[in-house]
Amino acid sequence: MKNNSLSNRVVKSFKLIDKNGAVIDTITIYVEIENIATMFNARLQILTEAERELRRAQKTKNTIEFDKSAEKYAVATKAFIELIFGDENTSKLFDFYDNRYIDMAKAIAPFIKKELLPAINNYKKAKKVELKNQFK
């Protein structure tokens, strides 16, 4: 049974503001929590492992290993962001931030940590209770 309550959807707008303070674009995302809840943790885990590999490669100072790790990290980052923002909005983000990944992370991380992650956790808790009640 699908729960169509509004609490299972997160809507957020992001203004893409240039260095002069002008709004270049606004992207609005509609995240259906039910649709991403399962994949969220899996993609986050892949991203976290890719980040660890990248840090290890930095320490070795082996450029080939670093380049491979950096590529893996970039792919994992994009896949994680696409899950949340969708293909079109992810393209807009990557185009706007143009290799300024730290700036992009600073812009979207608070939303992920403070709004999206709690919504996913609440959904999972409610789903667990729902499933438990079905088998009573």
Image: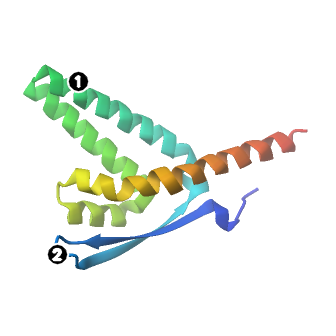
Q: Is residue 47 above or below residue 66?
A: below
Question: For the N terminus, which image quadrant?
Answer: bottom right
Residue 51 % position (x, y): 30, 34
Query: Tell me, what colour scheme is on the image?
Result: rainbow
Q: Residues within 10 Å of mark 2 (few under 14, many from 20)?
A: few
The residue carrying mark 2 is 20
Q: Nearer the viewer, residue 72 or 59?
A: 59
Labelled disc at residue 36? none
Mark whose residue sits in front, 2 or 1: 2
Question: For the C terminus, which image quadrant?
Answer: top right
Query: Disc 2 on helix, strand or loop?
Result: loop
| Left or right placement of residue 19 versus residue 30 in this view | left
Residue 22 appears in which quarter of the rendering?
bottom left
For marks 2 and 1, the one nearer the N-term is 2
Determine the CA span between mark 2 and mark 1.
Answer: 37 Å
Q: Amino acid at mark 2?
A: Asn
Q: Amino acid at mark 1?
A: Arg
Q: Residue at x 45, y 53 (%)?
A: 112
Q: Residue at x 82, y 40 (%)?
A: 132
| Left or right placement of residue 22 versus residue 134 in this view | left
What residue occupies the far front of the structure in this picture?
Answer: 21
Q: Is residue 125 above or below residue 108?
A: above
Q: Residue at x 35, y 66 (%)?
A: 89
Residue 115 % position (x, y): 52, 57
Query: Disc 1 on helix, strand or loop?
Result: helix
Labelled disc at residue 56? 1
Q: Residues within 10 Å of mark 1 (few under 14, many from 20)?
A: some
